[in-house]
Image (cartoon, rainbow, N blue to C red):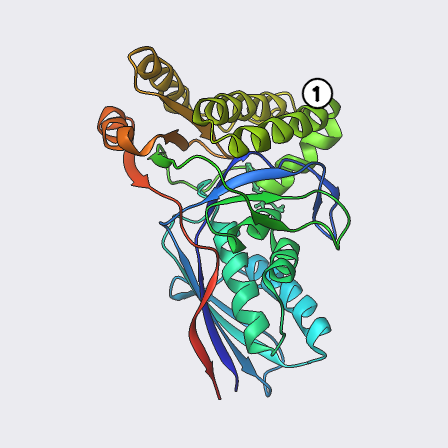
Amino acid sequence: MTTATARAFPNIALVKYWGKQDEDLILPVAGSLSLTLDAFPTTTTVALDAGARSDAFALNGAEASSDATRRVTRFLDRVRELAGSEARAVVTSTNEAPTGAGLASSASGFAALATAAAAAYGLDLDRRDLSRLARRGSGSASRSLVDGLAVWHAGDDAHSYAEGVSGPDMRMVIVTVDTAQKAVSSRAAMRRSALTSPFFPAWISSTEESLAAMLEACAADDFTRVGRITETHALRMHAVIQSCDPPIRYLAPTSVAVFDAVAALRDQGLEAYATADAGPNVAVIVRPDQAEDLRDALQGFGSVRLVGAGAGAQLVAPDSA
Ligand code: 2P0
């Protein structure tokens, strides 16, 4: 039995991934850019079990749902294809973020699974190929292979991977407004956006423009520009989501109140910018020297957590026979 364990952190996108050009290969309609966090890790062990007839998946100490297990098996099928192996595996995963609450747990989950499974099945992949592999599990997972700021390129299978970019030093305050499982998954909502939002073609070109501007702002170490692009772009994504038929709304009244509070804080000289993923929780970027002031100012909207830039997925235990 060959076993490997890996740990990965979630990432929060400043330029969002929202829509696929290829649903099988998980190729995005446009590139995106994110910050890998130093909190809410997923730790996953993959243990090959040559005698088993199916994969087993336990999440947070309990047997996972059949849907989640099927998704893991589909992912492991890809790993087995690359490794020329038929061995089934026992996958054990613990997730320190509330699953499904928009804290990108599928990103940390598939980044950790890709890293552990590649090692357990004996694949020798560099970081770029691990990012491409993680992408097949969940698009945003491609970015959690990378330390800190990561750009995930659109393109064909060979060229759609994430890599590091340098940019301004920043912190993030995560305001957890609600930990309930969201009603519509990101995957389903992305598909509905592409099929029914009249704004979707404009979303694609606007994301391409936002990413180009964001890369320039990062290269110039320009926090203000990074922040403005982040907030504008996030609200554009939610506009697309709300324009679906039937409509979807992820932002709760409290989420909107956090965006308003952040705008008011800016007027008072605390320079921060808000973003939100496919859920009601809000992530707010800030310069390091104002991070604690921001955390204190946002108490009361939900549970707040100050986080920084974290490391890309890594093995945490050596292979063992
Ligand atoms: C992002 N999100 O860029 C965007 C913003 C949510 C909102 O990536 O279908 O779970 O598994 O590729 O990666 C969530 O999408 O979707 C996501 P799949 P994923 O972070």
Q: In the figure, 127 relative to 195: above or below?
A: below
Q: In the figure, 148 relative to 167: above or below?
A: below
Q: Position of residue 273 (x, y in %)?
A: 41, 24
Q: Residue furthest front?
A: 220
Q: Position of residue 20 (x, y in %)?
A: 71, 41
Q: Residue furthest top?
A: 267
The kind of residue tagged 1 is Phe
Task: Please give the name of the residue rendered at 56% of the width and 71% of the height, measured from the top-left corner.
Answer: 117
Q: In the figure, 182 relative to 117: above or below?
A: above
Tell me the residue that label 1 is attached to.
Answer: 199
**Figure label count:** 1
Q: Position of residue 140 (x, y in %)?
A: 57, 46
Task: From the viewer's perspective, tell me whether residue 160 is left or right of residue 5.
Answer: right
Instruction: In this rendered view, identify the residue nearer to me: 170 or 173.
Output: 170
Q: Is ligand 1 less than 8 Å from the beta carbon at label 1?
A: no
Within 10 angstroms of label 1, few (less than 14), some, or many (20 or more) residues? Answer: some
Task: From the viewer's perspective, tell me whether residue 158 is left or right of residue 99.
Answer: right
Task: Please give the name of the residue rendered at 68% of the width and 25% of the height, measured from the top-left corner.
Answer: 203
Q: In which quadrant of this rendering is ligand 1 seen?
A: top right
Task: Please give the name of the residue rendered at 59% of the width and 88% of the height, measured from the top-left corner.
Answer: 51
Q: Position of residue 258 (x, y in %)?
A: 36, 22
Residue 68 appears in which quarter of the rendering? bottom right
Task: Please give the name of the residue rendered at 34% of the width and 30% of the height, measured from the top-left corner.
Answer: 287
Secondary element at image label 1? loop
